[in-house]
Every structure is written in C-alpha cells, then in structure tokens.
C-alpha cells in the first residue's frame, strides 16, 4: 500500500502533538501536584501556628482539656476540610475541632517520635502519616508545640485527607486533558488543511510529469504561493518550458535533418541511376558526377557538424584553458581559408588587427572553429557586394573579436534563440541551404566551455557578433 506524503506529514504532526502532550502533561502533573501539596502545607502550617498561639494564650486560664479549647479549635477550623487535635504535654489527645461529644480521638496517644521532634516552640513537623493508631488512614499532618508559661503544655496536630489533595489534582488534570484534546483537534484540522494545500502542487507536478512521460509537454503547474513550494512549482514550470522547447527543437531538427539528408541523397541516387541506366549521356556524365561529388561533400559537412556538436560537451573547461595561442594569427589564418567564399560573393573585408600578438588562453582548434563559423555566417548572410568588418582588440585585460556584416536584420524575438541547437531564423531554408542550425550552437558551446562570453546585436541591417577571451599571463 502506498504511503502518501500527505498521510506521512499528517501522521508526523499528530505524533509530535501527542508527544508534546505527554511531555507537557507529565511535567504539568508533577508540578501541579507539588503546587497543591505546597499550598495545603502552607495553609495548614498557618492554621497550626495560629491555633498554637491561641491555645497558648487560653492555657493561661483554662486547662487543655477544657470545653473552651474544643470550641476554639472548631472556630479556627471554620469552613476548611482540615481537622485540629490538641494534646497535653504527654501527647494524649484532650481536645478536637470536631463535635466534642462524638470525637473518637480522645485519649489516643501520638507517637513518641513526634514528641521528640517537637522540643522547641518554633519546631514544626510536616508529612504523610497515620500517627500510629491515631488516624484510621494516612493523612497529611502538620504539627507544632504549644508553648505555655512553664514550657510546652501540649501539641497541635492539623490534618487533612490526602484524597482531598488528590481530588484537587484530578480536577486540574482533567481540565488539562480537556484543553489538550480541544487543542489537538484544532491542530489536527489546521494541519490537515495546511498539509493538503502543501501537497496539492506536488500532486499536480506528479500528474504533469506523467503527462510529460506520454509526450505532452504543454501542461503547467499553477503557482499559488510565494514560499518554497511556490518556488518549486515555478522552477518546475521553467523546467517544463525548457523541456517543451527542447522537444520542439528536436522535432524541428528531425524535420530539418530529414530535408537536408533527403535532398542530396535524392540527387545522388537519381544522377547515379541515370548514369548507370544510360538515361544520362556519357558525354554529360562528368558534369553530373561533379554534382554527385558536391552533394556528397555536403552530406559529409552535415555529419561532421553533428559529430562536433555531440562531442563538445566531452571537453573539460580546465583542460581547455591550460593552453595559449596567438589570437591574431588564428583570425588571419581563418580569414585566408574563407577567401574564396568571400570573393565568390563579391564581398570586401575591413580588418582591424593589432600589429603585436595577442596571446590568449584556450584551445586553438576550438577557437579557430568559433572564428570560422562566425566568418562563414557573415559571408553567407551578407548582402552581395557589401563589407565584412573584422576587429581584434584588447580591453581591461581581455581580448575581443567582433565580426560585423550587412544583410537582413535578425528579428528581435529571434536573438535569444539563435544559439540554440538546430535553430534557424530562415524557416523556409531557401536562403540558408547549407546549414542545419548547428554553427552558432557550436560557437556558444565552445565559448561556454572556455567560460567566455559572446554578444550579438542586429539592427538596421547590421548584425554584429562579439566574443571574449582571457589574455594569457605574461611569462
């Protein structure tokens, strides 16, 4: 059986509430019992002290077994649940706060151990005891001596049933239990609601992930809060956007690659069959073999670009930055390798190159490919007969390379996407027939691996790419 996060969270909250209740209840029970015990002890001690002083005064006129003593003790007890006994100096009970005619304590003896403890007027005994056979059950007792003119004339014993204190403790504990049950029920309801709200976006994410597994990348999670769950839902939606975009790129790539492969393969197959079956005259065979060769080279370039794109992530940035090279030399050599293509499109090059070498950190071959792809793109999309501007310069400890051409402006909404894999701004592919949208992706990946930046601007028919490299420390 699946244990959902909702029930786990709810159970843990309820378990913590129960644990807190038991811990708090145990502390409260101990503390409340001690409090009730101390309150009773203080009250009984005060009553015993008052009775001792009163009896001490009356003892100057009356004997301890006089009826006046019993009446006085009854008055002192008043509405309390306590009982007061008065003994003579030998410890024999001679008076009681209860009905003097029905008291069963007359003549009873208090333990000698108690008398031996109460030898001074300021002495006091407190404890739970039956006082030998004085009481039928254990009671909480406070005892003090009664001081007369010739010393101690008797003893006062104030007692109360322990059941009275237990009853008070039970009543207070009962109130605690009732309050705790109410608090736990309210907390359970609140926890149920908050847990439900917390788990709801997670459940939605689970449902959305299942839709992703079925190929539906359009679903999103509703963000209803600004807490950590809200941030998670927002991040999930960003991930979903990325997945949907990747899926669209994948589909676009399949369409592009199918078109790019189909056209040259159809041409190669058709012309090869024509030459073999005699449809194409032998005197024209070299012309069509040249077309076949051109289309074969095109397929080779396509496969090579795809392999380059797939292998770029295997290079470690730290390894790439261990090497250094002359950036100016790389730019010049790359420009020379594209001379024929630039000349064929009747383009001029305005190159601003420094006279001294600029030694930068990075992999020479990879940066050569970056410069080649940018120059190749500039030549491919520049207006025939226009000028390509190429600049290499230093600023604030970094080297910059910029490639600028004049041609069609890249739409503003396309600028953030041009470095994506398989992205092509020319959807019809009539203008860019040789590419599949991997060139700028390779450029961006190489520079990311070098931990460098690249910027692009396109406005008023002028498109400019600029990338950075770190200058190598001088030895």
Image (cartoon, rainbow, N blue to C red):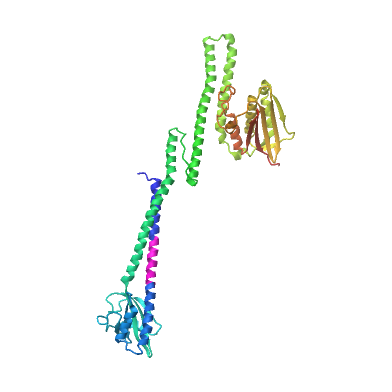
Q: Nearer the viewer, residue 366 or 18?
A: 18
Quarter of the picture holding the C terminus: top right
Q: Residue at x 51, y 25 (%)?
A: 255
Q: Residue at x 58, y 14 (%)?
A: 288
Question: What secondary structure characterizes most of the magenta part?
Answer: helix
Quarter of the picture holding the N terminus: top left
Whether 28 is among the magenta residues is yes
Image spot of residue 364 (x, y percent): 64, 34
Image spot of residue 217 (x, y percent): 47, 34
Above or below 475: residue 106: below
Q: Nearer the viewer, residue 370 or 77?
A: 77
Residue 186 image-quadrant placement = bottom left
Asked whether residue 332 appears in the rendered view, the answer is no
Q: Which residues are magenta?
A: 23-38
Residue at the right extreme?
355
In the rendered view, does 44 fall on the left or right side of 428? left
Image spot of residue 242 (x, y percent): 51, 36
Residue 180 image-quadrant placement = bottom left
């Amino acid at each position: 059986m699946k244990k959902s996060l909702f029930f786990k969270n709810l159970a843990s909250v309820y378990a913590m509430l129960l644990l807190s209740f038991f811990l708090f209840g145990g502390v409260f029970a101990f503390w409340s019992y001690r409090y009730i015990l101390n309150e009773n002890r203080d009250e009984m001690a005060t009553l015993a002290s008052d009775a001792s002083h009163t009896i001490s005064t009356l003892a100057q006129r009356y004997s301890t077994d006089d009826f006046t003593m019993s009446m006085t003790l009854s008055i002192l007890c008043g509405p309390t649940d306590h009982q007061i006994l008065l003994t003579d100096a030998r410890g024999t009970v001679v008076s009681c706060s209860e009905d003097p005619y029905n008291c069963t304590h007359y003549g009873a003896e208090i333990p000698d151990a108690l008398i031996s403890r109460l030898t001074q007027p300021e002495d006091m005994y407190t404890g739970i005891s039956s006082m030998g056979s004085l009481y039928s059950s254990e009671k909480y007792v406070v005892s003090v001596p009664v001081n007369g003119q010739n010393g101690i004339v008797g003893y006062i014993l104030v007692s109360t049933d322990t059941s009275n204190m237990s009853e008070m403790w039970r009543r207070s504990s009962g109130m605690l239990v009732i309050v705790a049950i109410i608090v736990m029920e309210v907390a359970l309801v609140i926890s149920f609601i908050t847990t439900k709200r917390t788990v709801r976006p997670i459940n939605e994410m689970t449902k959305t992930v299942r839709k992703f597994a079925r190929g539906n990348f359009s679903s999103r999670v509703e963000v209803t809060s600004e807490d950590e769950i809200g941030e998670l839902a927002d991040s999930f939606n960003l991930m979903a956007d990325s997945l949907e975009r990747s899926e669209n790129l994948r589909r676009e790539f399949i369409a592009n690659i199918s078109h790019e492969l189909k056209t040259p393969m159809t041409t190669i197959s058709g012309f090869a069959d024509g030459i073999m079956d005699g449809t194409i005259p032998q005197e024209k065979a070299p012309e069509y073999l040249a077309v076949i060769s051109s289309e074969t080279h095109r397929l080779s370039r396509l496969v090579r670009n795809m392999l380059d794109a797939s292998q770029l992530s295997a290079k470690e940035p730290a390894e790439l930055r261990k090497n250094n090279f002359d950036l100016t030399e790389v730019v010049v050599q790359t420009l020379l390798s594209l001379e024929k293509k630039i000349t064929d499109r009747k383009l001029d090059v305005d190159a601003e190159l420094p006279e001294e070498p600029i030694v930068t950190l990075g992999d020479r071959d990879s940066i050569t490919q970056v410069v080649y792809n940018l120059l190749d793109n500039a030549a491919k999309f520049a207006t025939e007969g226009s000028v390509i501007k190429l600049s290499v310069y230093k600023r604030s400890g970094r080297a910059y390379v910029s490639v600028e051409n004049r041609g069609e402006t890249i739409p503003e909404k396309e600028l953030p996407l041009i470095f994506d894999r398989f992205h092509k701004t020319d959807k019809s592919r009539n203008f860019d027939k040789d590419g599949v949208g991997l060139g700028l992706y390779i450029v961006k990946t190489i520079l990311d691996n070098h931990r460098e930046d690249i910027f692009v601007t396109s406005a008023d028919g002028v498109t400019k790419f600029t990338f950075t490299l770190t200058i190598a420390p001088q030895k």
